[in-house]
Amino acid sequence: MDGSKEKGILLVISGPSGAGKGTVAKTLLKNKDYCFSVSSTTRKPRPGEIDGVDYDFISWDEFESRIESGEMLEYAQYVGNLYGTPKKFVNERLNRGFNVLLDIETVGAFNVKKLMPEALLVFVCPPSMEALEKRLRGRGTETEEVIQHRLKRAADEMLLKDRYDFVVINREGSPEEAALEIAARVSEERAKRANLLK
Ligand code: 5GP
């Protein structure tokens, strides 16, 4: 990837917690044209999560100071914690030609679209709400109260899916299929934009 390439696509992936969008994102990221924007969050790390890789885990005070200094492209509160996207990293990588992937919730996604209308918004659906609940519980990392809150939030988020540029269903056991569908849309969009620049 070098500076002579056209700008990359800002790909925003949303979907309820437990829809498996993380797995879809990991599959997409095997392609070296893509990079992941590591968000900042005030949430505590889950077992196995790595600081600086999964999230930049920071305090509430630090988060607020980053908002004040204008470092966040967007931020939102989700089930009691703050989450935000680093502006500088995203712009730098897009300018270098990478497709930059944001895994963010719906409020943040619509704020990004307002700021950067050229962003491509994809909503990843679970195969069913039952499957979503099973995945959330299977993680075994959240309290019942948090699970209930996340399920309620998931139902609210599902109502917004038609406001996305496109929707993909993450069928049981085949995140590759959903990732391929997204990658095809991104390539199509890149080709369209490259043609417009000719
Ligand atoms: P989790 O706690 O399960 O990792 O994430 C909770 C929700 O926050 C998910 O829907 C995830 O996509 C979203 N999220 C993660 N990072 C960001 C961010 O930088 N901004 C916004 N708005 N949402 C985020």
Image: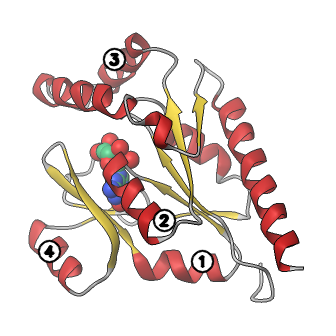
Is the CB atom of the residue marked by disc 1 within 8 angstroms of ligand 1's nearest atom? Answer: no
Which residue is identified by label 4? Answer: 64
**Between 135 and 189, the one nearer to me in the picture:** 189
**Between 49 and 90, the one nearer to me in the picture:** 90
Q: Is there any visible trace of residue 50 in the rendered image?
A: no
**Alpha carbons under labels 4 and 1: distance apart:** 24 Å
Which sits earlier in the primary sequence, circle 2 or circle 3? 2
Is the CB atom of the residue marked by disc 2 within 8 angstroms of ligand 1's nearest atom? Answer: yes
**Alpha carbons under labels 3 and 1: distance apart:** 35 Å
Amino acid under label 4? Glu
- Chosen colour scheme: secondary structure
Which residue is identified by label 2? Answer: 37
**Alpha carbons under labels 2 and 3: distance apart:** 27 Å
Q: How many marks?
A: 4
Which sits earlier in the primary sequence, circle 3 or circle 1? 1
Q: Which mark is residue 133?
A: 3
Q: Is residue 50 left or right of residue 8?
A: left
